[in-house]
Structures are given as structure tokens and as C-alpha cells.
Amino acid sequence: MKWYPVPGIELTGEPFIKKVKLSGKGIIIIGYENNLYALGSTCPHAGAELSGGWCKEGKLICPFHRYAYDLETGKGDPGQNDYVDSFPVEIRAGEVYIGIETFWDRVFN
């Protein structure tokens, strides 16, 4: 797993959604109820940009058709049969890092 620093995130406790590009992937960093989450930035249902969505009851809501994705796992609600990628998040010395699995991680695991 390779860890990437995410600049420009202030941990104030206020909710936020910020889109970043790391290792060629569009990822949204979500601050919700004093936790940080990282999910893929595109809705698999209709291709909507999820950074325009909002959080409700532990789920990210897509702004186009209101599909919901679990903040921890990326799994869609029952009946959706879809998901968005989820990524581990760490805070190191006040800086946010996102872990992205590499090609070699997939080969050897």
C-alpha cells in the first residue's frame, strides 16, 4: 500500500467533502461526525460527481439520483447492487494521508 499526503485539509470538526486526485484516481475526502473517510469520486450508477453530494446517517448521498453509499465500506444501499471504492485514511502529525493499493499489492496478496 502506498500512502499519499493530502494537502489543504483543515481538521476543524466541521463537515466537508473535498475532491483530490491521487495516483490517477479521483477521490473524495469526507469529514463527517469527527471522522475522516475516503471514497471514489464518481457514482457508478449514473457517473455523477459525488463531491457535490452530502452525508446523511453515515452515508454519502449522490446529488443526481439520491443513491446512498456507506462512508466506511463504499457499499450501496440494498437493491442498488453497486459500490464506490473506499480507501484507508490516516492522520500523521496533523496531516491527512490516503492509502492506495498498488499493482504489486494485488499481485502478491
Image: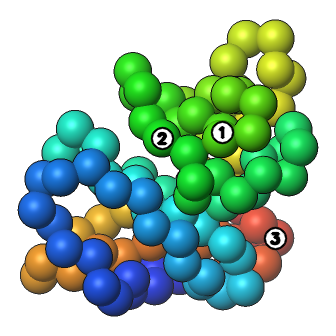
Q: Position of residue 109 (x, y in %)?
A: 71, 61
N-terminal of the pair, mark 2 or mark 1, is: 2
Assign a secondary structure to mark 3: helix
- Name the residue located 11 percent from the left edge and 62 percent from the top edge: 12
* Residue at figure coordinates x 65%, y 41% from the top left: 63
Seen at 85% across and 23% down, the residue is 81
The reply to whether residue 87 is in sight is: no
Q: Position of residue 97 (x, y in %)?
A: 36, 76
The residue shown at (76%, 66%) is: 106
Label 1, label 3: how far apart the Cα atoms are: 32 Å
Q: Which residue is mark 3?
A: 107
Q: Residues within 10 Å of mark 2 (few under 14, many from 20)?
A: some
| SS class, disc 1 | loop
Left or right of 100: which side holds 95? left
The residue that label 2 is drawn on is 54
Q: Which residue is mark 1?
A: 62
Q: Amino acid at mark 2?
A: Trp
Residue type beneath disc 1: Cys
